[in-house]
Amino acid sequence: MDRLNREHQIWAPLGIRLNWHDGLSIKFPVSEHSFHLKVTALHNGAVVWDCDVPPTARQERIYHTTQTYNIPWQVEIRQADGRRLFFWRTDLTGRDVCLRFLTESLGDVIAWMAVADRFHSIYNCWMAIQMKREFIPLFAAIRPRFHFIEESAFKAGDYDAVFPISPSEETIFAPVPYSRVNPFTYAQNLLAVDNPLEIPTLVEQPASVSRPAEKYACLLTGKGETELCGMKKAEWAVVASFLRENGYETVTLDDTAPLLENLSLLQGARFAIGVMTPLLWLAWASKKDAVQLVGTGCENQIPASEFRVTRPENGTSSAGDAITSEEVIGVIKTVPAFLKEYRKNHPLDNSVDFSVLVPVHNGEKTLKRCLDSILNQTCGNFELIACNDGSTDNTQAILDAYAKQDSRVRLLNHPVNQGRMATRRDLAQAATKAYTVWVDCDDEIAPDYLETASRALAGKDCDVAALRCELRLAYSGIRRAPVRGGIVRGDSMLSVFLKNDAFLDCFWGKAFRTSLLKKAVPTGFDKLLQEDMFFMLPLYEQAKSFLYVPSARPMYIYYGDTGEWSSKLHNMTPELFEEYCLLRHEQIVFSADYLTSRGYGEDILRQYIQNLGQFQYTLGVLESHPAWWKQGVEIFLKWFCKEPNCLLNDGKVKLPDVAAALRRQVDAIAGKAGTAS
């Protein structure tokens, strides 16, 4: 490490920046120096760059490769005389590594621990973590695989690699500007890992602190503060009275109390209410719902609670802008921990009933999370039907146990795997309630998913409703559908489907009229890349109404890295890429045949292909694997846009303009492949 530190003295003043987010990006500033750059992809040994970097007199020089999936890199930069200036490997498997959390902020430490967990899971290294002494007990007890140290115990020479993570710029390199708004991005770029999708669990403290009642809520203040976010004491009295009427006591916590004492009280609470202080980070990492009171200019802070009372950005702080008890109580009523019990005495009027359908194949790792999220709904008017499609793991035993414990659970079983389309057909035919909801076995839904859908659909004659979704993807981060509301009616909802602005091409995150779903189920097509698309196209085409259901937070959480093709995409080979292209070809053929049979022209098919990204993902997969670009281009052209004026080479679909645009993209990749060789 001493050698690395000495080299850093040469390296740092140059201002070269590496960014691991969304690919590897290396920026050489305006400088009189010349360098030699060599970048190798360690997963397959491909040399991405091996080139001289001349002096840049006017504009910075940028080397960037777009990657869709996590790739370990080796970066070497030499001076013109051949002396190594910088060497970095993102592969530290089995090495001794120290992460130095150089911060006074508990929020930073909690965020960075999530990234550290992800780093360790990738590289399986021996890891030491340096942090403030008082923070260590929060994490050390349940992380025996990590060695926690305070600053006085740190010795750089003990480790193969040291990563100082600090709000300042004094790091080995600064990948992105530090942001208090999102410390995740900073640490994740520095450590060259993908997005942490789970919040870090803190130590499970015993109930050593006296707790006021079985049900209580925590009010979180800053150091010695007695009022929150300008809210008057009289308004707080109204909130406390409302909580008491519903069986809750309240406990006030502030930053002056010992961390472990506050943690113990938080872990016993049903939920918390507070402003952006370290205690809110503590509640967040304790996996407690928190009603967050957000002041002016703080709307985008992390952690961003889903239960928020906010003030507009650039607003004033006059007396009229004070947060009211009515606003806070309104948000409390949406907190699932509160709402589920509240519903026992305040049932929904005119509630809609649902069939919740869960297809499962070898889902033992995630199935319990999925089923628990369904059975813990605040609205109880539903049946859960799960189909085990020939699983070879412990799936059936898990399903049997749940069915035995809860009469709402019904089971279907395929002794031999029949495929996803056949499983969805059988589940659709088994549904008995007015509306049907699909939940994949590796996903989960918010506790008030069905209640939100029921409220939106009650009293409306509607075929399809779309709820807000969140995609959690390790390779591209978290994506959320936009927030909107409103109902659309017409002879067909195909125009809505073709906009595809709320993940409309997928089963998940929707509620379908069951009678329509059964009528729209297609036959055949059992070996599919995206069976959703084969259902959705006829379903939306036959639907007469569509409802956007707005919500402040996502109702459906989609984990995109656990499915069959997700695994294949992470480990793509030319052979798998050919299979991928074949399945995409079949999808286009089905869509063209269906739309033609229903009397639609080429303009609708063009929208379908362009708006639903039929080739966006295919080319993205190809671009992510530079080691076999040439072979990949040949495979792609075997199926698509090789013949003049034809999208599909068999002539079934022409669309000359789409084919020409696609061919230009493929030629660009082919040009890169030629350069790389």
Image: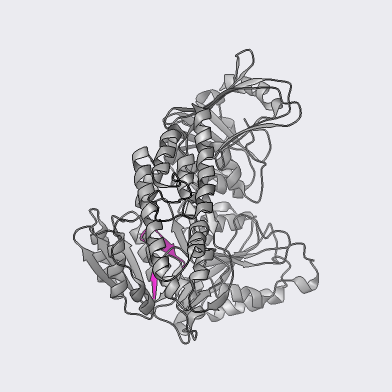
The mark tally for this picture is 0
Q: Residue at x 33, y 68 (%)?
A: 522
Q: Position of residue 625 (x, y in %)?
A: 45, 37
- Front residue of 584/416: it is 584
Give the x, y percent position of residue 353: 39, 80
Q: How far across and down, in percent of the image, does residue 611 sit?
A: 52, 59
Left or right, 568 with respect to 290, comes to: left
Q: Which residues are magenta?
A: 436-446
Query: Is 445 contained in the magenta span?
Result: yes
Q: Quadrant of residue 483?
A: bottom right
Task: Report which quarter residue 171 is drawn in.
Answer: top right
Residue 326 seen in the figure = yes
Q: Residue 204 in magenta?
A: no
| Location of residue 674 with respect to 252 vertically, above or below | above
Near-viewer residue (653 or 88):
653
Q: Is residue 200 visible?
A: no
* Nearer-the-camera pick, 217 or 656: 656
Please tell me whether residue 498 is drawn above or below residue 330 in the rendered image: above
Residue at the outermost front position: 644
On screen, residue 538 versus residue 64, left or right, reads left
